[in-house]
Image (tube, grey):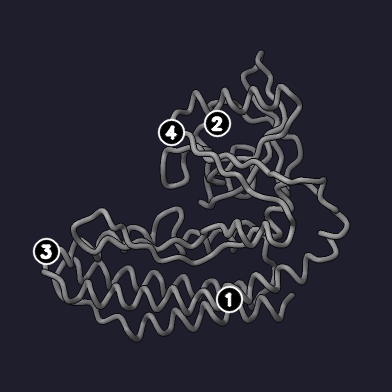
Amino acid sequence: MSEPEIFLYFGGYDFSVQRNENEFYENVSIKGNIIDTEHFSSFTNIKLDILNFNDTDKATNFIIDKVSLKKNQLGIVNSYYLSFDAVNYKKNNGSHIIIIEKYDEHTKSFIASDQRYTQEHITLNDLVVALTSNNNTDVELINLLYDERPDVQKIRGNIPIILNKNAEKNVSNCTKEFGKLKALLEQMNNSDAFYRSLSFYELMRSIKSVDGPISSKNYLIKSEYINNPLLIELLEKANRKWERLCLDLYKAHSTDEPLHFKDSIEVLEELEYSFHDAMISYL
């Protein structure tokens, strides 16, 4: 089992509502693919050390130095710009883990793999684009830290149990995050019309972003990692409701009117629960 394959099985993606405390108005963002590093570590005894680089030259030099020592490097990319990914390239936005294995100075290219492709070539320039297209320009690299070599066979045997636990955790998380969202939308409605309009626009932008719930679900649908018809149907229904909420937010932003959100949020919440319940049954 490859390192990114382990990450895919055990990492999990969490729905998250976040308020930007530095703004003078209610600036709220919604993300659909927050990686739960603690959940990953608790079941594998492998810690995830996430490194952020705002300088691409430093990031690429770090990668080259590491692979020159015959050590692999994990990176978070946007699959839309991953040139060797025939399923997603120029078709499907989504945060994705790859493992970078070698560098060829002569051709200025890397050898990289993921759970679908093995030892594919990608140029240095293409890799930089893929690494810097996850809703910000920072490069995110991941190191796996462990005290003793993981028992791969034991991890393999526990895959269904741990995925099930992850889905159960996400059901519980939905209650908390939708509660936060409803409270923050109420605060937006009660704020000054100008700032309320700004809040609605920024929230709509975050929902439609690469890290937002729509892109995250589209990635699951289009990347062909899920082949269960019921799960696909629930994901598609949820996305239609998220799109509807975006239209309502834009309308409220354009007209400076409060947002009537309670019914649509309740439907969305129910769909999120249904998806995770179906995932538990499927597993």
Mark 4 or mark 1: which is in front?
4
Q: Position of residue 214 (x, y in %)?
A: 46, 63
Residue on which disc 2 sits? 126
| Amino acid marked by disc 1 | Glu
Could you tell whether 203 is left or right of 54 in the image? Answer: left
> Which residue is drawn at the image coordinates 68% and 78% (left, top)?
280
In terms of depth relative to the viewer, which is nearer, 90 or 220? 220
When asked about the image quadrant of residue 206, the answer is: bottom left
Mark 3 or mark 4: which is in front?
4
**Secondary structure found at label 2:** helix
Say which label, 3 or 4, has the lower sequence index: 4
> Which residue is drawn at the image coordinates 68% and 44% (left, top)?
144
Q: What is the distance, in whole Å, between disc 2 and disc 3 at their CAs?
A: 41 Å
| Amino acid marked by disc 3 | Phe
Above-or-below relation of 172 to 14: below
> Which residue is drawn at the image coordinates 24% and 64% (left, top)?
26
Residue on which disc 3 sits? 194
Could you tell whether 94 is left or right of 74 in the image? Answer: left
- Can you name the residue that lies furthest to the front here? 147
**Label 4 with label 1: CB-CB less than 8 Å:** no
Residue on which disc 1 sits? 233
When asked about the image quadrant of residue 118, the answer is: top right
Say which label, 1 or 2, has the lower sequence index: 2
In terms of depth relative to the viewer, which is nearer, 68 or 144? 144
**Secondary structure found at label 1:** helix
| Amino acid marked by disc 2 | Asp
Residue on which disc 4 sits? 54
